[in-house]
Amino acid sequence: MSSCVDDDTPRREEQMVKHVITLDLPCDISNPKVSNIKAVLTNIQTKKVYTTDHFSFSDELLTDTLTLPAGMYDMKVTGNVEYQMVMNSASGKKQNNKVQKLKATVKATREKIDIKPGTTVTSTRVALSVYNASEGFLITEIYFTGSTTPDGYMYTDDQYIKFGNNSDTVMYADGLAFIETFFTSDDLHDYQPNIMDRAMTIVTIYVIPGTGRDVPVKPGEEITIALTAEDHTLINPHSIDLSKADFEIYDNVTHPEGDHDVPGVPNLENWYANFEGCFVFHTRGVKSYAIARPLVDRKTYMTKFRYKFSYIFRQGDFVIPMNENEYFMPNEWVVDAVNLSVPASHEWLLTSPRLDKGYTYCGHVDFDENRYTHAVIRKREGHSYVEESATINNVPGTWMVDQNFGGKGKWIDTNNSTEDFVPNAQPSYFAKKLRGM
């Protein structure tokens, strides 16, 4: 009897191939200096992982070579970058320009790299791009319009915003900043210097407290940041219960009618130096909001991230030169941004198109009386949204309603709020109340 397999046949050995990785530096930042660059190649069939971190710099390129078996690979590259942001002076004089040194992280990916047998050297070239390590967090809802009282007065203490984890792993929200733009989308001027392609100009910055792993957010879950985290129905029966919010925005002011600090609900940290007011979301919806991850501490941010600019204010016969000094947030530190505007009075977007190419809204005209008790909500995959009329808290209204409310599905994120958000939506806290949840 003979075997169908010849035991004397030598096994085929893996053919090892030298693979050259070439990385282009990020093209949208000035004077980048990269460090800690690491490439990880995973064999799609065997799942074996091969890494290299000995990149050398020459002729504006980073290169490294590793030897690995022929096969099909996915590659991920990560690292750090230091770069400069030049704040051009309004006068145009180069000597008055301010140079801000910044830090960020970089990455690159390439799928299905075919390293074929029978070759001695193969290569892959890919460009590094700046990204935020907190990618995966999104603004999922902004309830900025507020409600009304039984007497018909505007009530804004029940405003809130939600952040959601759109990744597949647990992420930590502590250290994330909630920011609001200084400019408004219904009032365009020629601001000089113009830094929108590099940063957001902000008038509000609140940071979630923690050491880095204190605020876990599971995949598909959200955290609520309330303006005031209390049961507002005890004050305004047309409102909602926010007593179980995760955080609240509290401003420690001396005015007797100042902010209310709810015991037991952690406050966000206000990073805006010498802030003396009480924050309220703009009820007409002409500001933009974002999540950011500052890569400096509070003291450094407050002292080194100021933006001095000027413009000419014109109204009728009045022409007034204006000079401002606000804070800026580098675009590379912004995790997610949402532009708001009023369709009938929209003049411009308040962020770089790289952050958000569109806008969303509540109400169709300026000072729309029908905008109250409405929100903008990020769409989910597999969900449908239909305009419906209902009565909530004895207040009749018409909303865009999620027909799959409570269901899961990835949030949609194309960096275009016109496509990603449901305008004039039923706020989730009101929807829960309507459904007895």
Image (tube, rainbow, N blue to C red):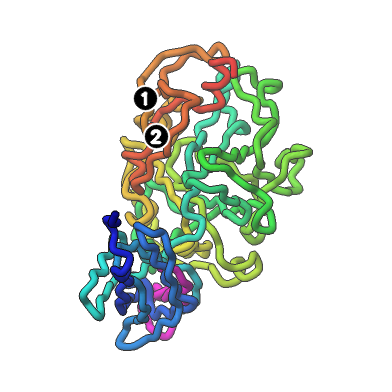
In the displayed structure image, the side of residue 335 where residue 258 appears, left or right: right
Q: Earlier in the sequence, mark 2 or mark 1?
A: 2
Nearer to us in this view, 309 or 74: 74
Q: Does the magenta-highlighted stretch encompass residue 82?
A: yes
For the residues labelled 2 and 1, say whether their Cβ atoms are less than 8 Å apart.
yes
Q: Establish if 40 lies above or below 161.
A: below
Q: Which residue is mark 2?
A: 379
The residue depicted at 30 percent of the width and 77 percent of the height is 17
Q: Which residue is mark 1?
A: 385
Where residue 43 appears, as percent x and y from the top left, is 37, 62
Residue lying furthest left in this view? 118
Query: Which image quadrant: the N terminus?
Result: bottom left
Q: Name which residue type carries label 1.
A: Tyr
Where residue 324 appears, as percent x and y from the top left, is 49, 63
Where residue 422 appears, as percent x and y from the top left, is 38, 32
Nearer to us in this view, 152 or 178: 178
The residue depicted at 33 percent of the width and 42 percent of the height is 346
Name the secondary structure under disc 2: loop
Q: Establish if 103 lies above or below 60.
A: above
Q: CA distance from mark 2 to mark 1?
A: 9 Å
The residue depicted at 45 percent of the width and 36 percent of the height is 284
Q: Name which residue type carries label 2.
A: Lys
Q: Which residues are magenta?
A: 77-96
